[in-house]
Image: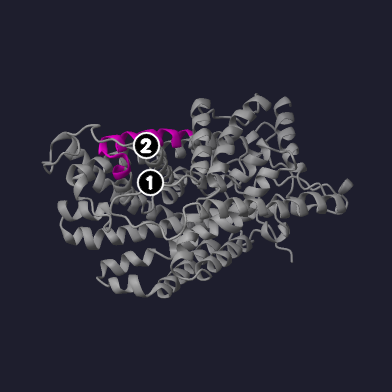
Amino acid sequence: MSIAYTPLTTDAPASPTSLERISFGRSASEASPEDPNGRKPNPGSDENLRKEIGLLSASSIIIGQVVGSGIYSTPASVALLCGTPLTALILWLVSGIVSLGGALASAELGTMFPQNGGMIRYLAHAYPRPRALVATIMAYSVTFFCRPAAIAANVSIFAQYFFFAAGRRDYIQDRDYLLRGIGALTMTLLMVLNMVSVRWSLRLLNGFAAIKMLTLLVVSFTGFLLLVGAVKRTPGTNWSRGFSGTKLDAQSFASAMTRLFWSWEGWSNVGYVVGEVKNVKRNLPLSLGLAMSILAVLYILANVAYFSVIPLEDIDNGTLLAAQFMNKVFGKTVGQIILPICIGLSILGVVMSELFGGGRLMYTAGKTGFVPYGAVLGEIHPRFGTPVYALAIIWALSLVFLFAPPPGKAFDLLVDLVQEGMWYFYALTAFGVILLRRRLPNYPLRRFRSSLVLSFLFAALSFLLGVLQFYPPAEIPGKPKPQVPYYLAPLLGVIFMSLCLVPWYLRMWRYVNRTGHQLLSWIEDEEQEVMQMNDT
């Protein structure tokens, strides 16, 4: 079935010297039989998607993915693992700076290859041999597992916070499939909105981001007032103890850093939609730098607020740290009603961001030839200007992950599996910046340069975090032990990535050798066309 394509809307007509508007040819799914040797032309710069994402919306996509429920609970676990809030505060700062390095590395790659797909496209250019193995494994791992599983994990829990605010805790404990059903209905409505309107989807993302920022600002501004002495602090020993009691052994450090970096994760989502960002060379680095820097300040101040009010010895691991804080500072109405509603909306914002980016991710995986049926996945609706088939597949896969696992251990394992494998892809992407600086030192579209030192640190720490998943985690006082072995989730993640070698062989070797279609010729063609344009 063919669909008429809508033209790309740009700020000015294309010109031979306008490198930002190079089309890079056609999609891999649009190759005609007349092409010699069956070569598939380049996937292009998403010429069928409208550029509707400005600086504000790009920042909202980042904030929408980064800020979930972690900042309201993770500080308690990190402080207990470190032994002192001051040590935890330093680790929050260090992890934020290193994560900013990873985000800026992504910004450099996004300006070099300003098309949708994010890490799929970056890894293909950084590691083209053997036959884009790394990018293929990433494409199948993320599009068919990590992203839909993450959507299912988040959409299944958001309703808990609304029931908690309504005083119906029995619904949280005894109505597992009711919560999943509410999640499925909500996800379907969000998916329909993603299908029919990019503009209204972005407006909703902006709204969710505003709620997240407002909630964080309330907590953080209270922390600032406590810091400068404008509000009297609760007597305690959190800050006066300094570093006394710090216990950063290997287990505690590994567990703390895993939680910290996972709290910063999500900035890569804007890379999946970079082909729809206006003025990429300005807005992409600026949105990543601003969003991550602002969140770093708010996260630090939130930690200051929490531990200026709640003594470390009084932390209740059965209650969100933010709820304890709100109860003490603003009263139970704010802590037990308003805050849970804000957190529930915050999680919905994550789901919206994941659907928006996930649809573009599936679209790119098909359009670039990594996944079969690219002619369908790469189609853009002529009226709505959205990848409707790609969004529908992400939605369907998310429903499978939402309802297939039984309650209890199996679903908890699914939640843990979401992050497995991503650390390795993050490491390879950041290290790819260093490789491409050597291989393409004068690439014309590299309009932004990230810090190679921070890129290397982020790559090293990301790889280390992937390996540390196999290390026994430290026990957190007051928290029950996990119901499944700690090594099961990372082991299953590695097994799943290994299984991705099967479609890689069938697609990139058997199919290519049998048909003669050069599915990956677009990688070199993109680079050569940009270099030739520069020479001209």
Instruction: Give the extent of the magenta segment.
Output: 79-101
Which residue was labeled with disc 2?
249
Q: Residue 474 carries which label?
A: 1
Residue at the (70%, 55%) spot, across then down: 371
Residue at the (23%, 45%) spot, across then down: 306
* Callout 1–callout 2 Cβ contact below 8 Å: yes
Question: What kind of residue is marked 1?
Answer: Ala
Q: Is residue 173 above or below residue 531?
A: below
Q: Percent x, y for residue 34? A: 88, 51
Bin the neighbour count of mark 1 within 10 Å (Cα to Cα): few under 14, some 14-19, many 20 and up.
Answer: some
Q: Percent x, y for residue 21? A: 64, 39
Whether residue 68 appears in this view of the structure is: yes
Q: Which of 38 and 497 is in front in this view?
A: 497
Whether residue 49 appears in this view of the structure is: no
Q: Is 89 included in the stretch rendered in magenta?
A: yes
Q: In this view, does 479 lie above or below 455?
A: below
Q: Nearer the viewer, residue 153 or 531?
A: 153
Q: Percent x, y for residue 514? A: 87, 53
Q: Residue 145 carries which label?
A: none
- How far separated are the C-alphas under marks 1 and 2? 9 Å
Q: Main secondary structure of the magenta part?
A: helix
Q: Earlier in the sequence, mark 1 or mark 2?
A: 2
Model colouring: one colour
Is residue 414 rendered to the left or right of residue 13? left
Quadrant the C terminus occupies = top right
Question: What kind of residue is marked 2?
Answer: Asp
